[in-house]
Image (tube, rainbow, N blue to C red):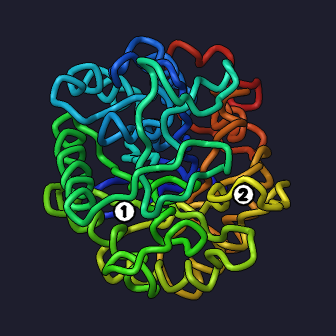
Amino acid sequence: MSKLFSALTIKNVTLKNRLVISPMCQYSSVDGFANDWHLVHLGSRSIGGAALIIQEATAVTPEGRITYGDMGIWKDEHVDKLKQIVSFIHANGAVAGIQLAHAGRKASCELPWNGGEQITEGENSWKPVAPSAIPFKTEQVIPHELSIKEIQEVVTAFRDAARRAKDAGFKVVEVHAAHGYLLHEFFSPLSNKRTDVYGGSFENRIRLTIDVVEAVQSVWPEDLPLFVRISATDWTEGGWTIEDSLQLAAVLKDKGVDLIDTSSGGNVPDAKIPAGPNYQVPFADKIRNEIGILTGAVGVIVKAHQAEEILEQGKADLIFIARESLRDAYFPLNAAQILGDDIEWPNQYVRAKREVFK
């Protein structure tokens, strides 16, 4: 059996293999509600053999959406459809997870296929918020700088969203603190110029992320996993660095976080990111082996042997598949055959397995 198709138990949740469908926005909701697109999109990937399916960045407030098409979990009415999706995922042998998010200053945007630019007026726009009144791009609207009271309201929104996620039946929750969204904006010195308890020192800049983690833990079952996605570096001089990420990971480990989903970038538009196969794996490797916490590797991991090698070399514990899973919803089933592992297929699909597994 390959490492890729070995099981991993985190708290009371056992993942049947090491392949995770990374949260990917579908921009297909109205008023934050999930619909049949999300059921089929996420459900097909559970049929496709992944161990963990993490639902897209799901906004904890309406203003926390990247676009007006983002999924949300800011009100109880959102839960019913999510229950259906979770039930289908679990019925097909995968674990359902959810990523809780707030877009911060990168909010109020048009759908990507309509250009993706920030909308400044009209019914599909709203005032973005941020740690400091600094826009993501100079030509964009200046975001509202959050007051201490408003920051506390954001923390409460994450807590309430985690409670709804529990009610919907999710077994893993991931806090989104990456890609230039609100929590990342707070911990990066490029976007946080505050002089109060949420700005200045490293400890102050990570304070919101820690507050959110603790708020989520106050309602999330102790026996279920809690992940945090971070951008390990801003790829920009004067910004957040891998050394900062090591410090943050150590704090999160002490707080009881189970895994660091290790991504990078997204906080400034002109960062020079050397994207390519395995380009973020060294960050997952460093955090895993220096801090002693589970990590997930993500970013241009597109081949079975590539994923297997990352795990065999001890550079990460889970492999997060994103765009490759959009190209191939059944990547795990195909990867198992490439690696020579005879894994269970859905009964309806068994007749399509390779002859070698007869």
Would you say 177 lies left or right of 117 here? Answer: left
Question: Which numbered disc flags the more N-terminal residue, 2 or 1?
Answer: 1
Q: Residue at x 59, y 64 (%)?
A: 231
Question: Marks 2/1: CA distance?
Answer: 20 Å
Placement of the N terminus among the 4 image quadrants = bottom right
Q: Is residue 345 visible?
A: no
Q: Position of residue 40 (x, y in %)?
A: 48, 16
Looking at the rendered structure, the kind of residue marked 1 is Ile
Neighbour class for label 2 at 10 Å: few (<14), some, many (≥20)?
some
Q: In front: 312, or 140?
A: 140
Could you tell me which quadrant the C terminus lies in? Answer: top right
In the figure, 72 relative to 318: above or below? Answer: above
Q: Is 84 rendered above or below residue 253? A: above
Quarter of the figure with residue 94: top left
Q: Nearer the viewer, residue 304 or 273?
A: 273
Position of 178 compared to 300: left or right? Answer: left
Residue 78: x percent and y percent?
A: 24, 25
Amino acid type assigned to the residue bearing label 2 in the image: Glu
Determine whether 251 is above or below 304 in the image. below
140 vs 218: above or below: above
Q: Residue at x 57, y 52 (%)?
A: 135
Return the residue at label 2.
308
Does residue 87 appear in the picture of this structure? yes
The residue wearing badge 1 is 10
Callout 1 secondary element: strand
- Quarter of the image where one finds residue 210: bottom left
The residue under the point 72% across, 57% down is: 308
- Tag 2 secondary structure: helix
Question: Is 131 or 86 nearer to us in this picture?
Answer: 131
